[in-house]
Amino acid sequence: MYQNQTYEEHSKSIILNNLDNIIIALDNMKAGQYLKNFDVILDSPILSGQKIARVNISKDSPIYKYGTIIGFADSNIVKGQVLTNSNVVFKEFIRDHKYCSKYQPTRFVNASSERKFLGYKRPDGNVGTRNFIAVVSTVNCSATVVHEIAAYFTNEILKNYPNVDGVAAFSHSTGCGMELSGEPMDLLHRTLGGYINHPNVASSLVVGLGCERCQVGGLFTNQGLHESSNLKTLVMQDNGGTSATIKAGIKYVEEMLDKANKIQRKEAPLSYLMVGLQCGGSDAFSSLSANPSLGKAVDILVSHGGTAILSETPEIYGVENSLTARAVSVSVAEKLMDKVTWWKEVYSVGRDVQINGIVSPGNQKGGLANILEKSLGSAMKGGTSGLMEVYNYAEKVTKKGFVFMDTPGFDPVSATGQIAGGANLVAFTTGRGSCFGAKPTPSIKLATNTNLYNKMNEDMDINCGLVIDGKKNIEEMGAEIFEEFISFASGRKTKSEILNLGRHEFAPWQIGITG
């Protein structure tokens, strides 16, 4: 299953790297159980995914997983003792940054082996995996209007437009009472512009109130947008208020639907596929199955000229040196370090957030000791390809290959930034069972373990627990995920789409002063 592994067949336990001083339990075990291959006796009951001391570990000594430091011993730990966040402590330590030392140029597949997907070709040259009409609010004050417009187009009405995936409303809780200029407004403009012009959107209607700070005109000027048959605007105060604006909006969307329904899927190279990488509700299996498997799929996608976006800056903290070592240039490596430094110095000092150590209660129950261990798994989603660029939140992604976008760790906010940047597919790993959709982009849910996949089958698309079960190795699982990328990108519905999730998950990152 894993590189450098040692596997205990009867007790289902594993060592991930020869440098590790811990063993990972792959099943629940009782106190006193003897792990023959490791000559270890458990001192207490253990849950699957938790850690066991492989040797005696003295106080303040580092704990190694995958050959990487994930914390330090809070006290003298004896061989066979179970390790949790109660005896594995988080603290700062110096990491060796060797910028670009592990960068390897991508080896692209031969032209004869290039894979394709069926997508919607757009006038600007991009290709979508879905065909939506977007109804976008510039400010929270027009939120009700955009939702009422979208809600008018029921499934019964949309049956008349089989080539349209839906009419989606995108509202948010800001747009006024905020800084009129600078990064907070620029960030909101980028996010709204990214959705209005998204490859998965055939046409957009933008609705403002009229007196807000995020004006329709200012947004269009900032993003270089112009009204056309595919892009219409309404301002409530100019249009006669709520009911009149809803009525006018419905008429605009009806016209857009007729045009969008004429667009057919056509073959497109995988270089037009851009996948946002997400993980939420992580557990100890995330770094054993779903995340490294997704990383293998990313490497295959990149070899076909595609793009993958790793994000959630607080959740790469502690292993950022593994990414800077893969950077294509020193400037790219420094961009990443600037983002990490900002989070540490500006956003989190003295605050009870996970970049300062403690992960969520669900992560703890899933066997993760601290942010270092979570970051180790999180970064695995990015595979092994070179890091080609680092982007601001919601910035348009133009580089092909593996890239990074600065976002918070909160999944809806992070995914919103990736989608605004151009992601036309999202791959979301989970060990605890995150339920998430992200219109207009399909979200593929990858379960880290079979129990979760079976228990929440209504929400889970792919069972990466087959790796834990010994039925597939990481390479095989990665190849399967890659094939699923193509299938879902070509029109197959994800579980979250079948459940109609994604109507309320549009969540631009709010920074700056609200007053």
Image (cartoon, rainbow, N blue to C red):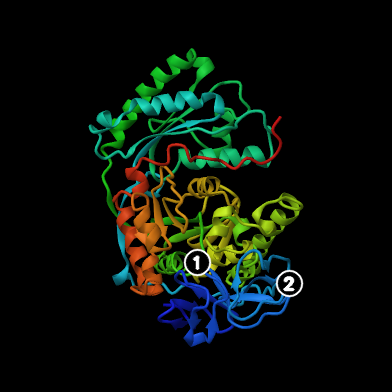
State the SS at label 2. Answer: loop
| Residue sitting at x 27%, y 48% | 265
State the SS at label 1. Answer: loop
Q: Is residue 44 left or right of residue 197?
A: right
359 or 248: nearer the eye? 359
| Badge 1: residue crowd in 10 Å (few <14, some 14–19, many ≥20) | some
Q: Is residue 256 left or right of residue 295?
A: left
| Residue sitting at x 71%, y 58% | 341
Tell me the residue that label 2 is attached to: 94
Q: Earlier in the sequence, mark 2 or mark 1?
A: 1
Dividing the picture into quarters, in which one does residue 439 lie? top left
Q: What is the three-letter code of the residue carrying label 2?
A: Ile
Tell me the residue that label 1 is attached to: 47
- In the rendered image, is residue 30 in sight? yes
- Residue farthest to the front, as pictured: 32
178 or 495: nearer the eye? 495
Q: Provide residue 45's location: percent of width, then percent of height.
A: 52, 70
| Residue sitting at x 44%, y 53% | 433
Residue 284 sits above or below residue 460 on the image: below
Q: What is the three-letter code of the residue carrying label 1?
A: Leu
